[in-house]
Image (tube, helix red, strand yellow):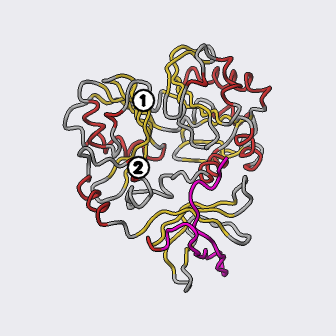
C-alpha cells in the first residue's frame, strides 16, 4: 500500500483511512454529509495525490495526444485544459483524463489513480511517432481546494488574481510560498475552486498554509466519500463505475469530447456508432420513494423486466433523495421516463432526469 506525502497528516487528523487504487487514502474525517456541505457552502480541501501525471514533450507530443485522445487537443492554447478519454479498439474507454497544454511541445496528462500503469502501457504501445514520455506520478502531489469561498479564501497565498482562472484554464504561478505550481480550475465537485499541482517535498507546506488561509472561511479537509457524492450530484462519470473498457463514450453521454474532425484510435467505428445511433445510454435517475440505489442494483422497466444496472448511486446530501446513474435502452433514456430500481425485495419507482441533479 502506497502513502501520499500527506498520509501521516490525515492519520494525525483522525481521518478514516482506506485502501484506494493502491494508496492509503482518507475516506472521511468528520462524516460524509458534513464534509459534502462544507464544499457546497464554504470551502474544503482534498488530497488527491494518488492521481497519475504523464509529461508528453517534444515535436511529436501533440501527434501522440491526438492519436490516443478522443477530444481535439489542437484547439488548446497555452494555459488551457481539456477533458478527454482514451478510446480502446473495441468501442470502450481505456480511461478518462484531463489534458493540459503547458507549451506547444509540453503537455501534461492527468489520469485516474487506478489506471496509471494500464494507461502508461497503452500510450507507450501507440507511440509510433516517438514523442518523449515521462511518468511523473510518483513525484507530484495534487490538492483540490473546492467550494464557493475558494477564491476568496486562497487569494492571500498567491500574487495572481485567482478570479481570472476560468473553468478549464490554469496558470503556473507562486502559491503558499512555493514558486512554479500549477493552479488549475477543472473541479470535479460543481462548486468551483482550484487544483494545486506541486512536488511531494512541497505539499506539506502548501497543505498547512491552505488550512491556515482558509480558517476564517470555514475550510475543512474532505475525504473521498464526499468527493464521490459531490461528483455524483453533478452527474460526472467515475471510471470503473460509469465508464470502463466496455462502455462507448457515445453511450456514456461523452459525445461532446469525441471529435470526428481528426483521426484517433477507433474513430471510424465510433463515427459509425454515432451515425447509426446507440442502443443504450447512461442516464441520471432519482427515486420517487425512500431508498438508496447502490452500484450493481438492477434497473427494471414498467413490466419489471431487468433492463440495466445502477453504475453509481447514493443518497444525495444536498437534495435528500436517492439519485443514481445507469445504462438503459435508448427508448427509456428520455427525461421523465419511469423506471424502477430493485432494492432487495422491492422495486422502488424512479424517474429519468436531466443532469446535473444539483443545480447550485
Q: How far apart are labels 2 and 1 at the CA level?
A: 29 Å
| Rendered image quadrant of residue 99 | top left
Quadrant for the N terminus, please. top right
Q: Residue at x 19, y 38 (%)?
A: 128
Q: Residue at x 56, y 15 (%)?
A: 174
Bounds of the magenta segment: 332-360
Front residue of 357 and 247? 357
Q: Is residue 339 magenta?
A: yes
Q: Residue at x 72, y 56 (%)?
A: 319
| Rendered image quadrant of residue 324 | bottom right
Residue 251 picture location, percent across and down: 41, 61
Residue 261 picture location, percent across and down: 27, 45
Q: Which residue is mark 1?
A: 136
In the visual, does 62 lie left or right of 346? left
Specify few, some or many for label 1: CA neighbours under 10 Å numbering under 14, 14-19, or 20 or more: some
In the rendered structure, find residue 256 and report the number of the disc placed on it: 2
Specify few, some or many for label 2: CA neighbours under 10 Å numbering under 14, 14-19, or 20 or more: few
As displayed, is residue 211 above or below residue 17?
A: above
As displayed, is residue 267 above or below residue 185?
A: below
Q: Is residue 177 magenta?
A: no
Instruction: Choose the circle earlier in sequence order: 2 or 1.
Output: 1
The kind of secondary structure element at disc 2 is helix
Residue 13 picture location, percent across and down: 75, 35
In the rendered structure, find residue 49 and report the number of the disc placed on it: none
* Circle count: 2
Q: From the viewer's perspective, is the residue at label 2 or at label 1 nearer?
A: 2
Amino acid at each position: 500500500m502506497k502513502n501520499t506525502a500527506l498520509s501521516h497528516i490525515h492519520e494525525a487528523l483522525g481521518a478514516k483511512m482506506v485502501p484506494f487504487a493502491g494508496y492509503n487514502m482518507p475516506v472521511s474525517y468528520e462524516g460524509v454529509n458534513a464534509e459534502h456541505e462544507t464544499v457546497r457552502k464554504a470551502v474544503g480541501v482534498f488530497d488527491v495525490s494518488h492521481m497519475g501525471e504523464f509529461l508528453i514533450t517534444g515535436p511529436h507530443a501533440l501527434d501522440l495526444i491526438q492519436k490516443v485522445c478522443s477530444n481535439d487537443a489542437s484547439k488548446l492554447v497555452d494555459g488551457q485544459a481539456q477533458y478527454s478519454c482514451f478510446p480502446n479498439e473495441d468501442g470502450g474507454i481505456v480511461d478518462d483524463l484531463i489534458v493540459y497544454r503547458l507549451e506547444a511541445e509540453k503537455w501534461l496528462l492527468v489520469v485516474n489513480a487506478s489506471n496509471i500503469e494500464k494507461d502508461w502501457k497503452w500510450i507507450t504501445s501507440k507511440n509510433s511517432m516517438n514523442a518523449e514520455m515521462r511518468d511523473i506520478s510518483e513525484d507530484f502531489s495534487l490538492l483540490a481546494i473546492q467550494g464557493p469561498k475558494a477564491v476568496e479564501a486562497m487569494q492571500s497565498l498567491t500574487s495572481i488574481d485567482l478570479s481570472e482562472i476560468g473553468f478549464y484554464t490554469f496558470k503556473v504561478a507562486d502559491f503558499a510560498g512555493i514558486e512554479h505550481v500549477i493552479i488549475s480550475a477543472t473541479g470535479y465537485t460543481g462548486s468551483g475552486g482550484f487544483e494545486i499541482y506541486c512536488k511531494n517535498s512541497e505539499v506539506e507546506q502548501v497543505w498547512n498554509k491552505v488550512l491556515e488561509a482558509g480558517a476564517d472561511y470555514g475550510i475543512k479537509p474532505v475525504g473521498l466519500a464526499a468527493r464521490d457524492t459531490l461528483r455524483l450530484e453533478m452527474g460526472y462519470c467515475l471510471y470503473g463505475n460509469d465508464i470502463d473498457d466496455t462502455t462507448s463514450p457515445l453511450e456514456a453521454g461523452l459525445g461532446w469530447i469525441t471529435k470526428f474532425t481528426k483521426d484517433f484510435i477507433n474513430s471510424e467505428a465510433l463515427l459509425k456508432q454515432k451515425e447509426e445511433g446507440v442502443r443504450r445510454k447512461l442516464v441520471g435517475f432519482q427515486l420517487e420513494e425512500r431508498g438508496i440505489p447502490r452500484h450493481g442494483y438492477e434497473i427494471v422497466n414498467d413490466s419489471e423486466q431487468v433492463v440495466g444496472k445502477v453504475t453509481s448511486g447514493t443518497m444525495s446530501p444536498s437534495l435528500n433523495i436517492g439519485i443514481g446513474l445507469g445504462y438503459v435502452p435508448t427508448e427509456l433514456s428520455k427525461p421523465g421516463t419511469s423506471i424502477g430500481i430493485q432494492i432487495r425485495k422491492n422495486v422502488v419507482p424512479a424517474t429519468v432526469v436531466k443532469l446535473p441533479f444539483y443545480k447550485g
